[in-house]
């Protein structure tokens, strides 16, 4: 079953990357967060493609698994994962960033669409996830709370206040994922605010930590599966090493593509490259 799911998630991630580019292109001159959207494709594909219990059929259950995109500008991967997984119609993605759309450039809480968090300001989602995980603990639910952070987001002091409290309350039902693409809006994370070893930092705060290739679906899948069965009183963190703008060579590791307008020429080049990489 594991190998079949991994194969299915690979198909899902390929579809998501192409759909994300299409969404960004049709958003027009409003632009889109392409860099972060493309770096987190495989992470979101694993979350919603079978490595967890995040599912549209459970949305009305109080004890459902929950995903919080604290790195809220990952919407290109977030919305495509939700649509592919049946939370809403795929055709709705065509309304991305259009006036009156329920799919703006940062997510707005909408349980009908599987969106459990209104994001924009960084550093906020971990605290919300901790509150939910603590409530689940008190109610003796076995469900998990997943929170996606960016490595640049870890400059925020609220992240470390949250990490300290998560360990204090022994929230082993909390799984944090860090999209570690080593770039943020202003430049390289090491130049803006040197983090040194994120893993050692989280371990010092009392987390169980693992590092993986954030574009290797098998490694991501196995990390999620292994952490779901560990109840040792420690919150968990998966540090996923990724490439900003992954899959499109002229976007990769370029801070200019953190948020950018995708011209017709660049859209065609990007789609051609993604499709060639599938072969």
Image: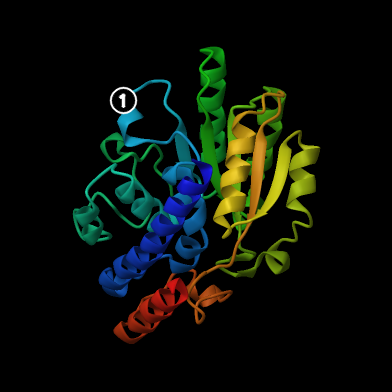
Q: Quadrant of residue 184?
A: bottom right
Where does residue 52 sit, x and y in percent of width and height?
49, 37
What residue sits 58% from the left and 37% below the top?
225
Colour mapping: rainbow
What residue sits 53% from the left and 50% below the top?
122
Residue 119 in the figure: left or right of residue 235: left
Q: Quadrant of residue 228?
A: top right
Which residue is label 1 attached to?
Answer: 60
What residue sits 72% from the left and 36% below the top?
207
Where does residue 172 sit, x and y in percent of width and height?
64, 27
The foreground one among 29 and 174 is: 174
For label 1, count other residues whose C-alpha is less than 10 Å away and answer few (under 14), some (14-19) or many (20+).
few
Q: Is residue 238 above or below residue 23?
A: above
Where does residue 109 sit, x and y in percent of width and height?
34, 39
Q: Where's the C terminus, which quadrant? A: bottom left
What residue sits 40% from the left and 58% below the top?
11
Q: Is residue 30 above or below residue 147?
A: below
The foreground one among 232 and 163 is: 232
Res 121 visible? no
Res 145 visible? yes
Residue 133 in the figure: left or right of residue 72: right
Where does residue 129 sit, x and y in percent of width and height?
53, 33
Secondary structure under the numbered disc 1 in the rendered image: loop
């Amino acid at each position: 079953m594991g190998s079949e799911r991994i194969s299915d998630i690979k198909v899902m991630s390929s579809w998501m990357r192409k759909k994300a580019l299409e969404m960004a292109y049709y958003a027009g001159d409003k632009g889109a967060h392409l860099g972060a959207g493309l770096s987190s494709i495989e992470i979101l594909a694993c979350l919603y493609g079978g490595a967890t219990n995040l599912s549209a059929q459970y949305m009305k259950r109080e004890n459902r698994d929950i995903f919080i995109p604290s790195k809220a500008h990952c919407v290109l991967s977030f919305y495509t994962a939700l649509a592919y997984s049946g939370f809403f119609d795929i055709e709705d993605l065509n309304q991305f960033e259009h006036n009156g759309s329920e799919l703006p450039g940062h997510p707005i809480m909408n349980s009908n669409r599987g969106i459990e968090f209104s994001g924009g300001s960084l550093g906020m989602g971990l605290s919300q996830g901790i509150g939910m995980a603590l409530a689940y603990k008190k109610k003796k639910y076995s469900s998990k709370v997943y929170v996606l952070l960016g490595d640049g987001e870890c400059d925020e002091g609220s992240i470390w206040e949250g990490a300290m409290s998560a360990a204090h309350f022994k929230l082993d039902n909390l799984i944090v994922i860090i999209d570690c693409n080593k770039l943020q809006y202003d430049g390289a994370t090491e130049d803006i605010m040197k983090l040194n070893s994120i893993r050692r930092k989280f371990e010092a705060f009392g987390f169980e930590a693992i590092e993986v290739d954030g574009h290797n679906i098998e490694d991501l899948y196995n990390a999620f599966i292994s952490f779901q069965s560990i109840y040792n009183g420690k919150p968990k963190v998966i540090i996923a090493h990724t490439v900003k703008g992954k899959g499109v060579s002229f976007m990769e590791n370029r801070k200019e593509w953190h948020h950018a307008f995708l011209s017709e020429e660049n859209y065609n080049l990007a789609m051609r490259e993604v499709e060639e990489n599938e072969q």
